[in-house]
Amino acid sequence: MSIITFNWDKHFLYAIIYWVLEICVRLAMYLKWEDWFKMSDSDVQNEYIYVVLLTISDLLAAFLVLYIKCSFKKEQKKLNKADTEVELIYDPGANEINNNKNLIIRMIIVSASTYFSRSLYWISYGITGAKNNNYSNQLQKDVVNTLDIIIRYIFSIFILHIIIHRHRVVSMFGIFVGFLFLIPADIILLINQNNGNMRISVGYVAILALRGLSIPFEDTYIKKLYIENYILPEKFMFFRGILVSMIIAVLTPILYFSFGIHWDIHFKTSNIICIIIYTLTSFVKAYFLLKIIFYFSSQSVSFLIISESVTGSIFQIIYFFKSGMGFVQVLLLFFEIIGIIIIAFSTLLYDEIVIIKKWGLDLNVRKQIISRGKEDVEKTIELEINRDSTFEEVLNQDDDNDNHDGDNLDNDIKENLQNNSVDNGVEEN
């Protein structure tokens, strides 16, 4: 029997497609930023465009909502044709009104967090004066991802009240070890490759590190919406797009006139094609991420965000081959790859996609809990059957004893009658 098993789930296909899209899009951004993705000489304005594009990708979920609505109507028509009567027992009442208010408040909070997370890029460029080509480094990605994974688990414990079993403790420790490989390697690489001011680099990373707080908060509350407010991923995505659009519509004029921004945006044919492809891929990625949260957990997103670090390492390999690699660069890149593998394995262990059948790490995974539940049900049924059969045997035994006692009583009556008749005959004589 193998120590490690892979618990395949068909919904894990969402994660695989997400990885492929993320790696392809980010590699294209790293390699062809100036030609395809840059639409303004101002990094602040350029990043704000991407905030708008991500919001448009959320609004594309309207097609999914319409599809679900049409499918539901078709199913309803089939039920009506079959003359099926369904009696509704649930009465909404005041609880439903309170639930709707709760949903609206939570949606506003999550949407505000989404806008803030997406805006941190242009905010960091605006505050520090950093340039994309000099400061969009691997350290920033790994610091954000480290915080994201750690804070995600903390929020899950205190907001979703998840139970931390042994395999999850081992998983968290593995993630911590993985980032011990990544962060030092990133710092050394940054020092060797930094083309700008180290103080600006640190400030840039520090501001973007806030994404490691806001994004986990957002995903944790999304899971809470799924559990307590029964909202589907498609509807949530569409409503989030509407609310973030409203925030953009209100804040954009305020920011424009407050800072006296000079409009500096230009589109080439390559930019337009890039915008369309980026928006569509962002729509698919965002939808699949919400599906992963829906079917698994908010912690499962940790496995998805690892793809950003993987893409960064792939880009470093390409960069080193182009510019030449020394022994130190090869060693640091090796440490990065080892760290990413450890983190990816640990997140799969946390989400119970990978199960280790050793040291009791498989006792409290969903698969084993369900298996034990089935065994308990089967044992309960067996006990009930044995109890019923024993009860019937006792009843049958009591019936036999009653019949036996009845026969003895009849024999006694017969003997008494005979004795009485004999006594009567003697008296007559």
Image (cartoon, grey):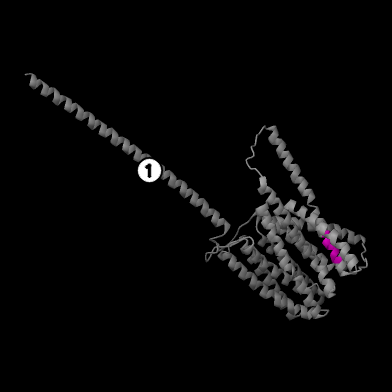
Q: Quadrant of residue 317?
A: bottom right
Which image quadrant for residue 81? top right
Horizontal side, residue 294 vs residue 428: left or right: right
**Residue at image mark 1:** 390
The residue lying toward the viewer, choosing from 159 and 163, is 159
- 98 relative to 388, above or below: below
In the rendered structure, the answer to whether residue 118 lies left or right of residue 356 reads right
Q: Tag 1's secondary structure?
A: helix
- Is residue 10 shown to the viewer in this render? no
Question: From where the camera sits, is residue 148 visible?
Answer: yes
The residue depicted at 14 percent of the width and 22 percent of the height is 421
Q: Which residues are magenta?
A: 46-53
Q: Position of residue 401 (x, y in %)?
A: 28, 36
Main SS of residues in magenta: helix
Residue 269 part of the magenta segment: no
Residue 253 position (above or below residue 185): above
Task: Look at label 1 and name its amino acid.
Answer: Thr
Residue 8, picture quadrant: bottom right
